[in-house]
Image: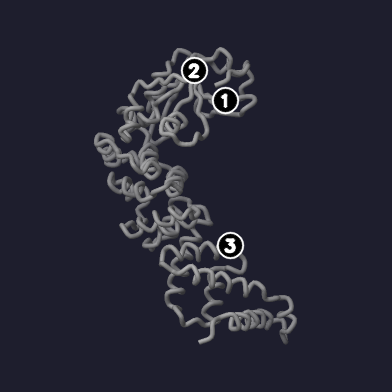
Amino acid sequence: MSIDHATEGLQLYIVGGAVRDALLGLPAGDRDWVIVGATPELMAARGFIPVGGDFPVFLHPITKEEYALARTERKSGRGYKGFTFYTGAEVTLEEDLKRRDLTVNAIAQSMTGELVDPLNGAADLSAKILRHVGPAFEEDPVRILRLARFMARFTEFVVAPETLALCRKMVASGEVDALVPERVWQELARGLMSAQPSRMLALLTEVGAANRIMPELVLNPGVQALVDRVAQQGLPLASRYAVLCLDTPELKALATRLRVPSDCADMARLLPVVLTAVARLGNMLRAEAVLSLIEACDALRKPERFDALMRTACYVDDMSRATCEAWQSWLHVVLAVDAGAAARLASAPDQIKQTVRAARLAALQEALPSE
């Protein structure tokens, strides 16, 4: 590691995920830096840019990486924001590491490459165990969500029994009720984009958190297996969320509770429509039914979403790739109709919409396989 002018002489350490992933042989992501023995005034004098809200975090003047002062924290209220932080120059690296969530995330690396591991996180990495650092874990309900997300990402890891017990205690005490929707969605989305989302869902269910933070969501083994299936195919977040919600009737209530982005909520609403329509039609294709589904999905305005819906349906319902591609081609047939030219054939202004639709039906009738 090189030392630049801004950091020269400072006690610098890389902490958290970058160290963990390097020890696991995984690609390096963003690095989190901790500085020991410094003050906000010293950081400003070195040209660092303060950006922290609750506690001092600074951007490097050149690389723009984040550097945080070593800190301790004390519970002062409900939820993940209910903490008071202390960042005095006398706070040690070990004290900073002890406030973290899991032992595997509480390993630091010095500028010379030396590991600082007071909580035996490296041993837990080798044993593939996710274990909480200490009793303070239960003070922050977000840590349950992060633990669940790590289960989805690190598919060979298990949770230590004492950590599971602590999570159940947090749920029973009502601590998870203080979670804000934005943070629940953030962690849920990251878990859905991981290798095996069903492990996240299973952990949340096992400790009783799923019913508390998203009671509308209906989970069963079949849905969880389908979520893993579309994850293995690399489908985007909206598709994964839509599959997650396949057995959930209260889609609007769930989306409202979690403040789900509109693209994800729309995919969850439309995927059952597509699956039902395609199954009902089977080989008995009619231009009217095909166009009606295209219209119901607003595919003329959002063709990319319709393509995504069909790709998702293909993996959910074992629809053949040829069938999926056929539906996509029929959409392109409809899109290719010159609506302006068709409109000019209308006998009156109030007939324009009907005339354009008739032109689209005629194009589809030519494109569909004959009986």
Q: Residue at x 50, y 81 (%)?
A: 285
On screen, 246 above or below 175?
below
Counting from the top left corner in percent of width and height, residue 20 is at 42, 31
Which residue is label 3 attached to? 304
| N-term mark: 3 or 2 | 2
Which comes before the other along the chain, label 2 or label 1?
1
Q: Earlier in the sequence, mark 3 or mark 1?
A: 1
The reply, left or right, for residue 180 in relation to residue 103 is right
Q: Nearer the viewer, mark 3 or mark 1?
A: 3
| Residue type at the position of mark 1 | Phe
Above or below, 141 relative to 233: above
Q: Secondary structure at mark 2?
A: loop
Tell me the quarter of the picture where residue 42 sits. top right
Whether residue 210 is visible, yes or no, is: yes
Q: Is residue 151 above or below residue 87?
A: below
Q: CA distance from mark 3 to mark 2?
A: 49 Å
Q: Which residue carries the number 2 mark?
A: 112
Indicate the secondary structure of the residue bearing disc 1: strand
Q: How many residues crowd around disc 3 within 10 Å: few (fewer than 14), some, or many (20 or more)?
A: few
Residue picked out by circle 1 = 58
| Label 2, residues with CA under 10 Å away: few <14, some 14-19, many ≥20 | few
Amino acid type of the residue that numbered disc 2 sits on in the rendered structure: Thr
Q: Nearer the viewer, mark 2 or mark 1?
A: 2
Q: Amino acid at mark 3?
A: Glu
* Side (left or right) of 148 relative to 335: left
Locate residue 116 relative to residue 304 in the image: left or right.
left
Q: Is residue 177 visible?
A: no
**Residue 65 image position (x, y, % from top left):** 57, 28
Q: Cβ–Cβ below 8 Å for labels 3 and 1?
A: no
The residue at 44%/16% (across/down) is 91
User: Is there a contact, CB below 8 Å, between mark 2 and mark 1?
Assistant: no
336 sits to left or right of 78:
right
